[in-house]
Image (cartoon, rainbow, N blue to C red):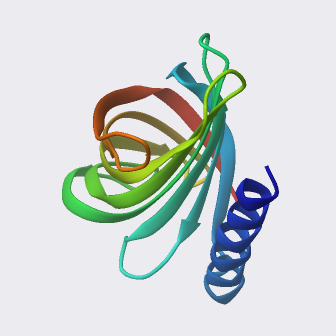
């Protein structure tokens, strides 16, 4: 358990440092598989880092982080924007009854930003587990973030 807490603190420290440099941060929630708390830290030219701390009905706890690239701007107006994004990342899954799993993750989504401070998004995230055994997992959901 101490290893998981250390890993989470290191990742949060990195993304907090990144957000302090850019002064752009968002926090909100995701409903899906899994459900949890989502944060966004803007990087450069539309790219961003996202982090998710979540849980699901199988009593799994997830932590994942991705570096997302802006793939395409679908629509842009004075008070709204629609973008496609995607990028690579890592995840940790821990279960009360089993050992933890760690692996690579991808993230693909569409985001709608309204009045520059509210983002609504839909994402899918394929994952490949590397610890204990190689397995494939697909997660995703709908969410929102308030942008500061």
Residue 101 horizontal/vertical position (percent): 50, 43
What residue do we see at 61% from left, 36% from top? 99
In this view, the residue farthest toward the bottom is: 21
In this view, the residue farthest toward the front is: 132
What residue do we see at 35% from left, 39% from top? 133
Q: Is residue 144 above or below residue 21?
A: above
What residue do we see at 40% from left, 28% from top? 140
Residue 65 horizontal/vertical position (percent): 51, 57
Q: Nearer the viewer, residue 9 or 66?
A: 9
Left or right, 32 with reference to 5: left
Left or right, 78 with reference to 25: left
Dividing the picture into quarters, in which one does residue 41 lie? bottom right
Q: Nearer the viewer, residue 123 or 90?
A: 90
Q: Is residue 75 above or below residue 43?
A: above
Residue 25 horizontal/vertical position (percent): 66, 64
Residue 95 horizontal/vertical position (percent): 65, 28
Q: Is residue 59 above or below residue 128?
A: above
| Count of numbered circles on the image | 0
Where is the C terminus found, in terms of image quarters?
Answer: bottom right
Left or right, 2 with reference to 117: right
Dividing the picture into quarters, in which one does residue 37 lie? top right
Q: Nearer the viewer, residue 93 or 52?
A: 93
């Amino acid at each position: 358990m101490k290893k998981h807490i250390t890993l989470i603190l290191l990742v949060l420290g990195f993304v907090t440092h990144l957000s302090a440099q850019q002064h752009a941060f968002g926090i909100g929630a995701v409903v899906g598989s899994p459900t949890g708390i989502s944060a966004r830290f803007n990087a450069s030219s539309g790219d961003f880092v996202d982090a998710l701390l979540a849980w699901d009905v199988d009593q799994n706890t997830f932590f994942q982080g991705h570096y997302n690239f802006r793939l395409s701007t679908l629509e842009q107006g004075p008070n709204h924007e629609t973008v496609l994004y995607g990028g690579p990342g890592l995840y940790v899954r821990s279960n009360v009854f089993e050992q933890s799993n760690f692996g690579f993750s991808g993230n693909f989504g569409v985001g709608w930003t309204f009045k520059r401070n509210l983002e609504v998004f839909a994402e899918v995230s394929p994952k490949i587990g590397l610890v204990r055994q190689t397995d494939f997992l697909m997660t995703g959901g709908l969410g929102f973030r308030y942008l500061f």
